Amino acid sequence: MVLKKIFSSGMVVACFLSFPLFSLSQEKSHGRWYFAVSGDSRDCGDLIMPKIAASIQSNQAKAPVEFYVHLGDLRRMFDIDCDMAIRQSPGFDCKTRKQPLGRNAMNDYLNHAWSDFVDQQIKPFGSLPFFVGIGNHELYANRTRQDFERTFQPWLTQEVLHSQRMSDAGKGILTNEGDTTYHFVHRGVDFIYLDNADGPAFTASQVLWLSKILAVDAKNAEIKTIVVGLHAALPFSKARGHAMDDSCQGRCSGEQVYDMLYRAQNLEGPADQQKEVYVIASHSHLFLEDVYNTPEHRGQVLPGWIVGTAGAEQYTNFIRYGYLLVEVRPDGTLHPDFREVTAQSPPLAEGPGAEALTKFCFEQNKHPVAVEQPVKMECSCGAAK
C-alpha cells in the first residue's frame, strides 16, 4: 500500500504502510540482517519520515529491516515546524516566517507537536519496531524529560525494552521503566541508546550504568557487536562544532564514554572475545562518515556516522535527506549504506500547501554551518587528548 499525505481543509489524512510483523526475538535462516537509523526530523519531518518508511518498505525483499531507531529532535519546539505551519495556513512562507499564524498558534502547536510526530512520523512505519531517542529540542519550551517519558511511554516500555530491564535486574543492573537511556540485545548485537540531550552531556549515573552493561557484554561470547546510538556526537568528532564539545561537562563525560567504548573492543584479547563497536549520532543536520577519525583520537578510532537527515534544516549548501540502512553480517561487522529520499520519492504531498511544502523542504531548508571547528576550550578531564 502506498502512503499518501493529503493536505486538505487544514487536516492531514494518511493511509499507512502495511509492514510485515517483525519480532526482535525472531531468527532468520540466513545470517545477515538489517536495521535503519536517522535523526533530526523537525521542520520537514512530516514529509520526509513517511518517505523513509516507504523506502524501507519497498526494499524489504532485498534488505529486510528489523527495526528503526530515531536519534532525537522530533519537532522544532522553539517555533512552529514548517510542515505543521503550512498545514494550518497553506500560504505560509517557511523561509521568511513573517506571516502571522494567529494569537494562539504557538500554544496550539506545543499542545500537538508530539502527537503530530506520532501520527505523521511513527505511524507510517506500521508494525516495524520503532525506537525513539530524546534530543535537545525535546527539552525546549519548558518541556522536561518526564514529559517526554510520559508521552512516549508506549515506545520506551515496549516489550523488548521491558524484558531487557528484567534481565539486567537479575544481574544487579537496575534502571527505571521507561527511561530515556536504554538498551536491548538482538541477534548478537547490543544496541545502546545514551541520552545526552541535556548539555549535551552524560551524568555520572549513566556512565556507571554503561560500565556495568559493557562488563556484562565482555563476558558474553554471543554478543559480537555493540552499537551506541545517541543524539549529539561524542567529543572530537568531525562535527565538534555542534556536538558534545560545547562544555567541559559534555567533553569530559563524552571522552570517558568514548574511552570505555574503545576499550570494550578488547583488541588485545583473544580473537573470540573481541567486540565490534560502532557509534551513530545526529544533532548536526547532515550525513558524515568516519566521524571519529580525527587527530585528537590518536589512531584510536571508533567507526562512527552522523545521520541528522530526517527532515531538519540541513547544515550544508545542498539538501540531502535519508537514513542509514545498516547490514549486520554474521561476523558482527556493520556495513552501512546511506539511502537518500528525494522530492519524487513516494509518498508525495497532495492538496493545498503541498507544492509550497515540497519546494521549501527540498530547495530552501538549509543553513550551512561549519560543524568541524577547532576546539579551543581547555578542560581538565584527566589525560589530555
Image (cartoon, rainbow, N blue to C red):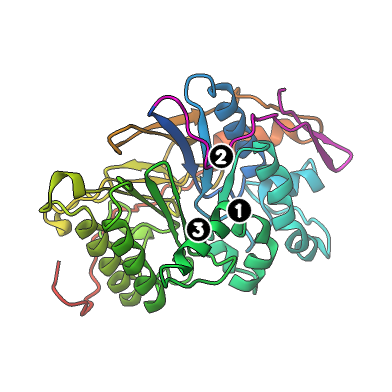
Answer with left or right where residue 147 lies relative to residue 286.
right
User: At 64% across and 50% down in the image, what residue appears?
Assistant: 96
Q: How far apart are marks 2 and 1 (CA)?
A: 41 Å
Residue 4: within the magenta?
Answer: yes
Q: Is mark 1 on a helix, strand or loop?
A: helix
Q: Quadrant of the C terminus?
A: bottom left
Going from N to C along the chain, the mark reached first, 3 or 1, is 1
Badge 2 crowding class, 10 Å Cα cut-off, few under 14, some 14 to 19, many 20 or more, is some
Q: Give the range drawn in magenta.
A: 1-30
Disc 3 residue type?
Gln
Q: For mark 2, what is the residue? A: 364
**Disc 2 or disc 1, which is closer to the eye?**
1
Crowding near pointer 1: few (<14 within 10 Å), some, many (20+)? few
What residue is shown with label 1? 159
Quarter of the figure that contains the N terminus? top right
Q: Name the residue under label 3.
A: 164
